[in-house]
Image (cartoon, rainbow, N blue to C red):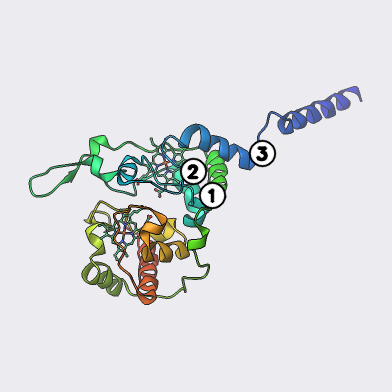
């Protein structure tokens, strides 16, 4: 009898210690990781660079609008085992050296991204979803799901619009100054992609991505294309 009571006491004690004032709630623990280990490279509050020099000095993507941009499940997965998304890192101009025919990436200057434990990644991904700067630029439902063949998508992306001069459409094929687009639909919310391509500088001031005044029909086709690319297995 005494033993059973002792056990009950021990269980209650442990439970209250875990919930006690020293323990952070789930969302708070994500915020704490961001503040302690991420703000050195990722901006959480300022909505973007104030000058070209600021853009050049950015050490990582701006997260003030992370909740309007990324897919939460993707952030969680990626943080367990980060892979490179911008082949020439950030900022790409700092990681390029002159080659024989053209500039080449100086891989020795590219750092490996820190990875997180599963519980940390989950807490951070959830915390990042609350960063919603620039919501006014998004039209929920702007993207209307549809299909395009890879060859028609490629034609539009490479031939008609010249987008592949800055973006990889598969590993090793395309330009290296922008993020790879073959994983874009895994990473990014569809409505964000529509809005970003329509006016890149509204989201990312001084961005090198040209504003092409694309028609809605083409914006939709590009997202169809990125979704088709995301289903290919390039690994
Ligand atoms: C030393 C600088 C640095 C630190 C510290 C850092 N990051 Fe990053 N982060 C980067 C860079 C650079 C990229 C772009 C990687 C690429 O394009 O391959 C990136 C990309 C990301 C991405 C993918 C989003 C995207 O669009 O590329 C996520 C998510 C991310 N970081 C989260 C975090 C979290 C969470 C922390 C803290 C635990 C953190 N980062 C700490 C530099 C950093
Ligand atoms: C001169 C180089 C350049 C060209 C040409 C270009 N882009 Fe970009 N693009 C970029 C850069 C740099 C970014 C990253 C901008 C940022 O996050 O600030 C980007 C970002 C993007 C993104 C968001 C990807 C992400 O991971 O954040 C999409 C989608 C995109 N571009 C599509 C296109 C399409 C479609 C075209 C052709 C109409 C195009 N781009 C032409 C440089 C370019």
Mark 1 or mark 2: whose residue is earlier in sequence: 2
Q: Quadrant of the C terminus?
A: bottom left
Residue that protrudes farthest toward the front in the picture: 50
Q: Residues within 10 Å of mark 3 (few under 14, many from 20)?
A: few
Q: Nearer the viewer, residue 117 or 11?
A: 117
Q: Quadrant of the N terminus?
A: top right
Q: Position of residue 211 (x, y in %)?
A: 31, 63
* Distance from Cα at disc 3 to Cα at disc 1: 18 Å
Q: Position of residue 78 (x, y in %)?
A: 44, 47
Question: Within the image, what quadrant is residue 31 found in?
Answer: top right
Mark 3 or mark 2: whose residue is earlier in sequence: 3
Q: Position of residue 140 (x, y in %)?
A: 53, 67
Residue under label 3: 25
Mark 3 or mark 1: whose residue is earlier in sequence: 3
Do the CB atoms of the residues marked 1 and 2 lie less than 8 Å apart? yes
Q: Nearer the viewer, residue 125 or 230?
A: 125
Residue under label 2: 44
Q: Is residue 155 above or below residue 101?
A: below
Which residue does the image show at 27% across and 54% down from the upper left? 171
Which residue does the image show at 45% across and 64% down from the upper left? 190
The answer to whether the beta carbon of the residue marked 2 is less than 8 Å from any atom of ligand 1 is no
* Distance from Cα at disc 3 to Cα at disc 2: 20 Å
Residue under label 1: 131
Q: Nearer the viewer, mark 3 or mark 1?
A: 1
Q: Position of residue 63 (x, y in %)?
A: 46, 47
């Amino acid at each position: 009898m005494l033993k059973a009571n002792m056990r009950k006491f021990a269980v209650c004690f442990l439970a209250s210690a875990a919930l006690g004032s020293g323990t952070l709630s789930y969302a708070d623990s994500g915020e704490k990781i961001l503040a302690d280990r991420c703000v050195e490279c990722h901006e959480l509050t300022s909505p973007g660079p104030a000058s070209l020099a600021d853009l050049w000095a950015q050490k990582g993507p701006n997260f003030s609008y992370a909740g309007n941009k990324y897919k939460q499940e993707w952030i969680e997965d990626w943080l367990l085992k980060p892979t490179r998304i911008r082949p020439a890192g950030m900022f790409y101009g700092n990681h390029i050296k002159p080659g024989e025919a053209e500039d080449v990436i100086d891989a020795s200057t590219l750092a490996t991204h820190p990875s997180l434990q599963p519980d940390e990644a989950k807490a951070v991904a959830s915390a990042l979803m609350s960063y919603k700067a620039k919501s006014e630029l998004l039209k929920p439902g702007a993207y209307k799901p549809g299909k395009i063949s890879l060859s028609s998508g490629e034609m539009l992306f490479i031939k008609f619009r010249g987008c592949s001069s800055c973006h990889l459409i598969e590993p090793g094929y395309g330009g290296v100054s922008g993020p790879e687009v073959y994983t874009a639909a895994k990473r990014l919310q569809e409505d964000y992609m529509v809005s970003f391509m329509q006016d890149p500088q509204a989201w990312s001031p001084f961005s090198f991505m040209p504003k092409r005044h694309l028609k809605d029909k083409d914006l939709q086709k590009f997202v169809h294309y990125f979704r088709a690319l995301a289903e290919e297995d390039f690994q």
